Amino acid sequence: MANIAVLERKCDGCGLCLERCPFGAIELKNGLAQMNSACRNCFSCVKACPKQAIIRLETKTASVDKNAWRGILVFCEVNAGRLHPVSLELIGKALELAKPLDYAVNAVIVGKKLDQHAEELLHFGVTKVYTYDADGLEYFRADAYAACVEDTIRLMKPSVVLVGSTLIGRSLAPRLATRFRTGLTADCTKLELRENSDLVQIRPAFGGNIMAQIVTANTRPQFATVRYRVMDAPERRERASGEIVPCAIPKGVYESRISLISSKPVPPGKSISDAEVLVVGGRGLQKQSDLEMVKELAGLLGGDWAVSRPLVEKGWAGNERQIGLSGRTVRPRLIITCGVSGAIQFASCMNMSGYIVAINTDPHAPIFDVAHTAIVGDLYSILPQLIRSLREDKK
Ligand SMILES: Cc1cc2nc3c(=O)[nH]c(=O)nc-3n(C[C@H](O)[C@H](O)[C@H](O)COP(=O)(O)OP(=O)(O)OC[C@H]3O[C@@H](n4cnc5c(N)ncnc54)[C@H](O)[C@@H]3O)c2cc1C
């Protein structure tokens, strides 16, 4: 609906606004201008009206008392007895954001047998670790976990809540944001905190073609999820500091509408996000068997292999090997891309790697904009040479 009103006592039906409206959204009815549903609030008519008969309606949104919400809370994920490393990366970012506003950074963990994890978190600079430790919380159940974290949020009233963009985090964060009727930005790649405590949540949008800056200006807390390997984990401190706060399990947690029938632990597999060395195949590869060269080079370098999305779409590799916006973010010490153009959806998820070598026949390929070493050439001649010389070295 238009945020525009026509003052009947001032409108004389001159029709100038009809001429100026680029959307044909104004009609004259009984000699008075009237907006229809085509109005896009461009306000050209407001400027055009010589009688100031068309006015802009300002809507005031109720804003929260931002000073009542202070500090940063990090949801630290414990799954199958393991603290997910994204939790430490989030703590690192939270500490950096918190400094100028003198905010405390606290952590919350939910699960079973959490003592060791809670103690470990005290080596990373958090002020308090809230724990919800119970047999019934051993496995993730979205409603039960959300109830526990909601409890901490009501207790601590943090301005910002950070959650890892993992399978669990992606299920938990939207539930929490809905409970607090506030905003959530998923998969942020950059976070900044303004003086007024508004969190600027930066992430690729429109297929990665723009970097959107999103602000939750009128509500608190502000929820953001961040993928693994995007932020830096802080150094582990020798001495632990801070306090562990064991919390009572909120009422109703065990009345979950989700019942666990059975569970089968997924064997802890290697993830390309954890690799220190990666060799990546792109659409420059002509057939599936050519991927063997990529795998062999990766093996000789003691690393892992990955692919760009077209290769997953062809069925040559599973999605767990895909780098990119719809795949994984990686940050190895060394990455060698072979026949990858470097589209933004790919490059934005690997451009933080320590050292990037790109092999491509096209000297103008965008991958060379992020590469430290650019090899303009045919992967079918370069890869066999590299493999041969590494094999020689190994002899
Ligand atoms: C919403 C959205 C999400 C997306 N998510 C992802 C994602 O997660 N991951 C992803 O990868 N893509 C993603 N894409 C697709 C992305 O835009 C690109 O289409 C894709 O990354 C291209 O893959 P590529 O570089 O392998 O192929 P191409 O762009 O086709 O590039 C192939 C390159 O190989 C070079 N080449 C050809 N032959 C040789 C040779 N013999 N030797 C050396 N070089 C050679 C060519 O010069 C070319 O630069 C997404 C797109 C959208 C819209």
Image (tube, helix red, strand yellow):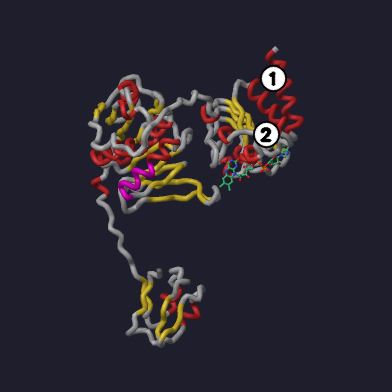
Residue 84 lies in what quarter of the image?
A: top left
In this rendering, the answer to whether 262 lies above or below 252 is above
Q: Is residue 184 left or right of residue 380?
A: left
Q: Is residue 29 above or below residue 132?
A: below
Quarter of the figure with the N terminus: bottom left
Give how far apart the Cα atoms at labels 2 and 1 are. 17 Å
Q: Which residue is mark 1?
A: 390
Q: Is mark 2 within 8 Å of ligand 1?
A: yes
Residue farthest along the front direction in this orientation: 261
Q: Residue 261's spot in the image, x, y percent?
A: 40, 30
Query: What residue do we see at 41% from left, 40% from top?
Result: 171
Residue 255 in the image: x percent, y percent?
29, 37
Main secondary structure of the magenta stretch: helix
Q: Position of residue 269 (x, y in %)?
A: 52, 25
Q: Position of residue 188 (x, y in %)?
A: 45, 43
Residues 71 and 24: in front is: 24
Task: Give ligand 1's quarter of the image.
Answer: top right
**Residue type, numbered disc 1:** Leu
Residue located 70% across and 33% down the image: 288
> Which span of residues is magenta-colored?
173-181
Please, what secondary structure does the residue beneath circle 2 have? strand
Q: Is residue 180 magenta?
A: yes
Which residue in the protein does label 2 denote?
338
* View extreme (right): residue: 381
- Marker disc for residue 323: none
Residue at figure coordinates x 34%, y 24% from the top left:
117
